[in-house]
Amino acid sequence: MKLQNNAIIYSLSANKKLGLDVCKNLKTELGGINLLKFPSGEVLASPNSTVRGKQVFIIQSTCPPVNDNLMELLIFIDALKKASAKEINIFIPYFGYARQDRKSKPREPISAKLVANLLNTAGAYRIITFDLHAAQIQGFFDCIEDEMTAIPLLRHAIINDPMVDKSNLVVVSPDHGGVNRARRFAEKLNAPIAIIDKRRNASYQPEVMNLIGDVQNKNCLIVDDMIDSAGSAVAASKALKQFGCKDVFMAATHAILSDPAYDRLVENKPFKKIYVSDSIPLQERFVNNKDINIEVSSLSNLIAKATLAINNDSSLSDAYEEYKDDLVKSN
C-alpha cells in the first residue's frame, strides 16, 4: 500500500521529530505550517498550502506544556476545517488530562470529557490515541476514536534485549487497574504476573500495602501506561526488592517525567532499565543518562502503518503485523 495523493500529514510543536520519522517511513514530506506565538501568548496556527478536499493527518501530543499544545491543536483543527479539509484525523500519542476521567470526590470536573468535547467541536473526524490511562475515555468522543497500543513495540524491545533474563521474569502490575495491561505483556513473554496492592494516603502519595504473587529471586518488569513524577514507580521498585526480587525493569508508554522524577530516579536508581516510547519527546537530561538508563522505541512505524490503513480503508490491526510472531519460548 502507499499513501494516496489526497492525503497530507502535519506535525505540530509537541512531536516534530516523530512527525518527520513517520513521513520518512511513508516516503513523503510533512505539510508546511504557519505557526506564530504573539507576545500576549496567543497562538496562530494554519496550513501554508491548500487542504481543500484533502484527507488530513495531524500528529500532536497534549504533553507538557499541556495547555499550549492543546490550544495549538484546537486552533489548527479549526483552521483546517474552515479551509475545507475533507477529513481531519488526529494522532494524539499522549492524551493529556486522561487522569481526570471521573469524579473521585464532590465538585471535581471530568476534564478528559471536556477535552474530548473541545476536539469534537473544533472539527476532528477521527482521534487516534495510544494507551489511554482509562479505557472508558474512548466513549467520551462523539467522533471516531481508535485506541492503539505501544505494548507490542515495548515488548519487542524487551524480548530482543539480552540484558533481560526472560527465563526468570515476572511481569508486575503496579496496581489493580493495570492487570490487563500486565497480562498482555506477560502472555508472549511466557512469564507469570504479580500485582502490587497500592493505596494513596491523605497527601496522595503512593503506599504499597501488599504483593499478590511470588517475586522471590526473580527479575521483575513493572508495566504501566506512564511514568510521571516517578513516586509510584520508585515505591513499587522498593517494595519488590523488599519481597526478595533481584533486578527491576520498567516499561511505560508515556515518559512524562515531571519533576521531581529526575532526582528520584538518579538518587534511588530503582530500575536496571526503563523502556518507553516517543509519544512524548524525552527530555535532554534523560538522554544517554547512565544513572537512569532509558531506552526509547519509536511509534513512527506504527503511526505510519495506521495512516496507510486509514488512507486505504483497511484495518488498523495491520499495523501490528510484524510483532505477531514475537514470543519467548518456554524452557
Image (spheres, rainbow, N blue to C red):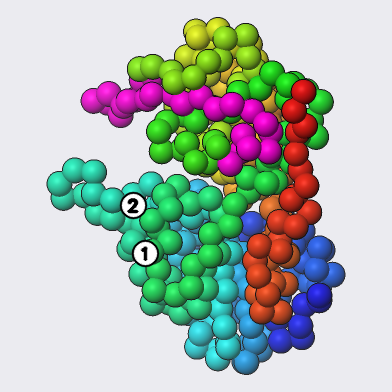
Q: Amino acid at mark 2?
A: Asp
**Residue lying at 76% horizontally and 43% vertically, measured from the top left:** 326
- Residue 140 disc label: 1
Using the rendered image of the protein, determine whether residue 313 is visible from the camera's viewpoint: yes
**x, y percentage for residue 5?**
77, 86
Task: State the residue at coordinates (49%, 19%).
Answer: 213
- Identify the residue at image location x=73%, y=25%: 166
Residue bearing the label numbered 2: 101
Instruction: Label 2: state its secondary structure.
Output: loop
Given the current orientation, which residue lies at the most extreme left position? 106
Q: Residues within 10 Å of mark 1 (few under 14, many from 20)?
A: some
Q: Are marks 1 and 2 in contact (CB under 8 Å)?
A: yes
Q: CA distance from mark 1 to mark 2?
A: 9 Å
Q: Is residue 273 above or below residue 2?
A: above
- Spot the residue most to the right: 27
Depth check: give the residue in front, 93 or 73.
Answer: 93
Q: Which mark is residue 302?
A: none
Q: Which residues are magenta?
A: 184-208
Specify the farthest residue to the front: 331
Q: The disc labelled 1 sits on which kind of residue?
A: Phe
Q: Is residue 48 visible?
A: no
